[in-house]
Amino acid sequence: MSLPTSVRIVEVGARDGLQNEKTIIPAATKIELIDRLSASGLRTIEATSFVSPKWVPQLADAAEVFAGITRRDGVTYPVLVPNLQGYERARAVGVCDIAIFTAASEAFNRKNINASIDESIERFLPVLEQARADGVRVRGYVSTVLGCPYQGEVPVSEVVRVARRLHELGCHEISLGDTIGVGTPGKARVMLRAVAGEVPMSALAVHFHDTYGQALANILACLEEGVGVVDSSVGGTGGCPYAKGATGNVASEDVVYMLEGMGIATGIDLPRLIETGLWLSGALGRATSSRVARARSA
């Protein structure tokens, strides 16, 4: 086992972190959040999602937010798109990087989008075809890789199958998500190793929720396997509505603190990132979940 010398953090707070907030957050606050994150040295910041406002009212301002951010050289701002209509809306405001999503659990897919795994992937084919023609990069998310709120255990073989299929279809990076935060380091290691047998490790990322306080341990296990991309959310925002007691995504501040303490470069200004987490906490009117932020501000 050898650790990477550097890790790229994919910041998902502005999309995955905010989408579950019950109170509608002004577009100006979202724009300021993304600009603050850009200033901290993050190179990949997921900006928003061009889903139907009917399903995710919090992100109804996607076009306004993306058009309003100050895009920096060397930083990418991917957005989530569910279909060709969402893709076209995103392209209209200058989006150059997108993400699509499915699950490794048949039960999860059927419950949430009324489609099988294979049917959900079929729905993305027009998006992938158009993105290829436009030269737009596509990231693929695979959720419920370590457990599902409906079916429980998810076969590793299904995670491998779905990740391989998305990669074959042209996704340059596959994010493996423990949606409900039930994974443990041993299971995370086994899952990642199996997927890496079919998809190059350089094309894989990990995305852990911290429901049972296992996220950092899971990330470390995956780093030891060679993964070099980690998703996280400033202030630990986000979460899954299907997991009782879920505490959100792993906090970006905690991840960066751990990586830097291990001598792994991130290129991120940690004090500035912590400041952003504290600012967001105040903007949302609730306490941040980041232990590092609390410690540094004491």
Image (cartoon, helix red, strand yellow):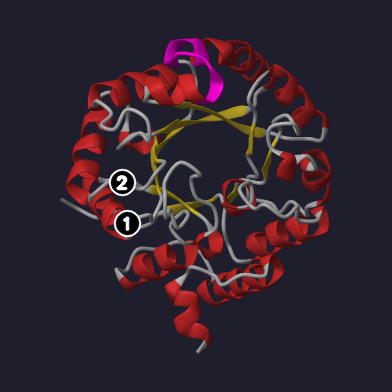
Does residue 118 belong to the magenta stretch?
yes
Task: Give the image location of residue 154, x and y in percent.
Answer: 28, 28
Rendered residue at 53%/16% (across/down): 114
160 displayed left or right of 63: left
- Circles 1 and 2 in contact, beta carbons < 8 Å: yes
Q: Could you tell me which secondary element the residue under label 2 belongs to?
A: loop
Task: Give the image location of residue 1, x and y in percent.
Answer: 15, 50
Q: Alpha-carbon distance for marks 1 and 2?
A: 7 Å
Rendered residue at 69%/31% (across/down): 51
Identify the mark at residue 182; answer none if there is no mark.
2
2 displayed left or right of 123: left
> Looking at the image, which residue sits at the far bottom?
298
Q: Could you tell me which secondary element the residue under label 1 belongs to?
A: loop
Type of residue at label 2?
Val
The residue closer to the viewer here, 5 or 68, is: 68
Type of residue at label 1?
Tyr
Question: Chief secondary structure of the magenta span?
Answer: helix
Tell me the quarter of the picture where residue 13 sits: bottom right
Q: Which residue is mark 1?
A: 212
- The residue segment tinted magenta is 112-120
The residue closer to the viewer here, 57 or 165, is: 57
The residue closer to the viewer here, 42 or 179, is: 179
Tell me the quarter of the picture where residue 53 sits: top right
Rendered residue at 35%/33% (across/down): 148
Does residue 270 belong to the magenta stretch?
no
> Looking at the image, which residue sits at the far front?
244
Q: Considering only order in the chain, which callout, 2 or 1, is on the residue closer to the N terminus?
A: 2
